[in-house]
Amino acid sequence: MINIIKVNNEQQFNETGAGIIASLVQSNPRANLGLATGSTPVGVYQRLIELYNEGVVSFKLASSYNLDEYIGLTEDHPESYRRFMNEKLFNHIDMPQENTHVPSGNSSNPEQAADEYNRLLDEAGQIDLQLLGLGHNGHIGFNEPDEDLQAQTHIVTLDERTREANARFFDSIDEVPTHAITMGIGSILKAKQILLMAKGKDKAEIVAKALTGPITTKCPASFLQTHPNVVVILDQEAGSLV
């Protein structure tokens, strides 16, 4: 079942997303949170920091598991997802650092790193809430459109459109990694609840394909239609075709 929530502005977008996450942690302090990077959740994380500072929610017993990481970037690289999460959220709340998990992108053996992350997810049990953004090509995590999709954490070659979209964070597209490590579609769909967030006119077409189009590996996000508990938060532009 997909529950679509359309909001009128950026403040409502961030407050709605943060409210869902905070409410979960309030009711289940030991929640396992699946987290995402990119521009979409930045305001949500800022609002969660505010709620923490206001004493509304504590993350000291919760754990987090990020979707993905670039291959070849050290943890302290300005564009690594570990550093992103530290700067945008983890450094500002009371979740213990050892409870925050991001796939290793700088391992000498990426395939082994993927296997280790799969074991970590298995040990954690079910993710209570998985936060997702949506790529212009329909990717979730870094699961790119392909003939086949992998269920578990794996190494992926990034689509050129994905690299072009992320080039704005680097000095040039030549610096954007060509590969990433990502949770698989199966791992994402195992979550008890999925929270998909998208904003902007440029996302309207892919939102419609993901939520109302055929379920196909050419649009990985379309597999969310098979999940029993999906909440989608859209601004008016992103939701204009659904």
Image: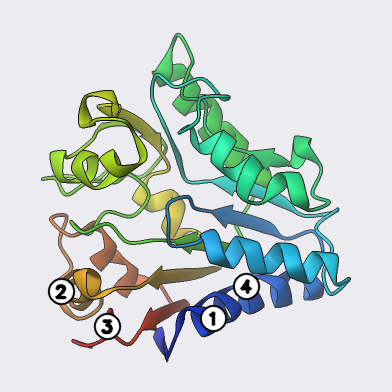
| Image mark for residue 11 | 1
How many C-alpha atoms fall within 10 Å of the one at disc 2: few (<14), some, or many (≥20)?
A: some
| Image mark for residue 237 | 3
Q: Disc 2 marks which amino acid? A: Glu
Residue at mark 2 to residue at mark 1: CA–CA distance: 23 Å
Q: Is residue 128 visible?
A: no
Q: Check disc 4 and report the residue beneath it.
A: 18
Residue at mark 2 to residue at mark 4: CA–CA distance: 25 Å
Which residue is most to the top?
108
Closer mark to the observer between disc 4 and disc 1: 1
Q: Earlier in the sequence, mark 3 or mark 4?
A: 4
Q: Earlier in the sequence, mark 2 or mark 4?
A: 4
Q: Position of residue 8 (x, y in %)?
A: 42, 91
Q: Quadrant of the N terminus?
A: bottom left
Quarter of the view holding residue 75: top right
Is 91 on the left-hand or right-hand side of 134? right
**Disc 2 to disc 4: CB gap under 8 Å:** no
Q: Position of residue 66 (x, y in %)?
A: 54, 45
Q: Is residue 93 visible?
A: yes
The front one of 12 and 132 is 12
Q: Check disc 2 and report the residue beneath it.
A: 205
Residue at mark 4 to residue at mark 1: CA–CA distance: 11 Å
Q: Quadrant of the C terminus?
A: bottom left
Residue at mark 3 to residue at mark 4: CA–CA distance: 20 Å
Q: Disc 4 marks which amino acid? A: Ala
Q: Earlier in the sequence, mark 4 or mark 1?
A: 1
Is 214 on the left-hand or right-hand side of 85? left
Q: Position of residue 114 (x, y in %)?
A: 45, 27
